[in-house]
Image (tube, grey):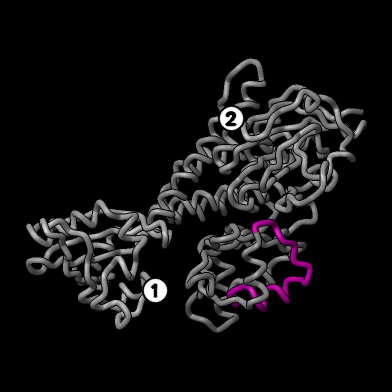
Amino acid sequence: MQAEAINDKDDLSNLINKAARKLISLTCSKDVYKFIADSLKEILPDSIIIVNKATDNGEYLEVVEIRGIEEDLIIQALSITGSDLFQRRYKVSDTFRQLYTKTELYHHTGGLSEFASSALPDTISVALKSHFKIHDIFTIGIADNAQYYGSVHLFTTSDKCTINKPVINTFIYLCFLCLDRIISHQLKLKSDHKYELLFKNMINGLAVFKVVTDCIGTPVDYIFKDVNTNFEKMFELEREDILGRKLSEVLPDVLEDSGKWLKKLGKIATDGGTLQMVFYFPMFDKWFSVHAYSPQLGFCAIILENITERKTAEKDYHQLELKLKCLSDINHFRSSPVSDLINYGLIKASELTGSKIAYIYKYDAHSRCVKMVSFSGSTVTYPAQASKEVNIDTTGMWGEAARLKGPIFIDDFDLPEPLREIFPGQQENVSHLLNIPLFTEGEVTAIAGVAEKEQKYEEVDALFLSLLMDSVWTKFPGKQTQA
């Protein structure tokens, strides 16, 4: 990758797809941090790259990769600071920590001295001040709204160094997705191992029941005989309040929702044996792994492990795989007409953002008109007039994506018509909408959107939708801006 090619907007899709293909093959977080440093240095040869890994829940950063500072300069800096060892791990101020978690490239304007005093190890700070003329300083978090894996410091050493923020933002987000995939998988393995240790030492939730049967010996209820502290915490119960009481009195919904496996517990209490299974409690919105056995005739004991996080990690891991595969598939999509690719992109946009509707409009900046290109969804009727050109100024809130050249999130659907319409003539209401602009040569040439997600859309949805639909739109022959 050459710097000149990277700064060419037409090569953005190729760069992202190349990075995505490489990241899919990585299985170690250390390799991802190295890939970030190598790639950024290749993109920006007149720069110094410092990649940090977050530790201790983000309280500390650890320098894991450096590009642009030779080892002998680090050794000289050690002698100046009077240190015998290069301390890579450092704590940063609360102010800078907030900046490090930003998912977009942030430009520091306070100068090297201010930045170095609060956000760098002393050795690196001395090396930079002694041997380099720093022009600009940038920081970006390897993060999304919920998770933070580190940050990247970028120092330009030439006034000719051009920073393409959308490229850097997109590249780092792809690296975050890869790290999240790897770390989620590691957490799953760690959780499995942790479950085995907890089971052997019986430090998970533990409850002992006496089985209540009817006149013919069929289990109909269970009386709490004993519980441990972890069981109390799992179900937000007090031991003194439940001992001696029936399960149907304490947790009636559990007895109703989990009748089948509770009958199996009754059989274990009378016949012996063990039971191991995974089940979901809707009333608590939690997943549990259960091991049951009979400590004595007529009694059963259950050991519970809350595996909700593991189940969530498995789901997130699967979603990340699907998103990366989707981006790769778009790059290799071969079909004629090009409308097949657009329809495929909209279907994937719906599936992978949890939406029921997806659409794309072509936008002419000269006439300020939009026209539907394609629509996917079944919860809103598509009227005939929707295919006509409409002035962007009459489209309501969702048209702000073109006017402001940024993503628009709409959750307030108490707005009057036509402010909440996806297209003219729409009759049904929709819930939660996300619109993004698509660009050609720096000008907005299309608006893509999704709607009808059960929850609110987040920044991560906007980033993925931009990656996906930008890759699709670059192949659309009618996207050129008008004179």
In the picture provided, is 318 more to the left or to the right than 460?
A: left
* Residue 253, placed above or below residue 314: below
Vertical side of 186 occupied by 440: above or below: above
Location of the N terminus by quadrant is top right
> Where does label 2 land, which residue?
331
414 in relation to 356, above or below? below
**What is the secondary structure assignment of the residue under circle 2?**
helix
- Name the residue located 41 percent from the left edge and 48 percent from the top edge: 27
Q: Amino acid at mark 1?
A: Glu
Neighbours of disc 2 within 10 Å: few (<14), some (14-19), many (20+) = some
User: Residue 42 at x, y = what percent?
Assistant: 62, 47
Q: Which mark is residue 236?
A: 1
Q: Quadrant of residue 327?
A: top right
Determine the CA span between mark 1 and mark 2.
Answer: 50 Å
Residue 172 visible in the current orientation: no
Q: Is residue 329 left or right of residue 446?
A: left
Counting from the top left corner in percent of width and height, residue 403 is at: 85, 44
Q: Amino acid at mark 2?
A: Asn
Relative to 309, 244 lies left or right:
left
**Residue 115: where, in percent of width, then height?**
70, 73
Residue in view at x 19 percent, y 69 percent = 209
Q: Nearer the viewer, mark 1 or mark 2?
A: 1
Region of the chain picked out in magenta, as a range: 103-122
Q: Is residue 174 magenta?
A: no
- Does 71 appear above or below 81? above
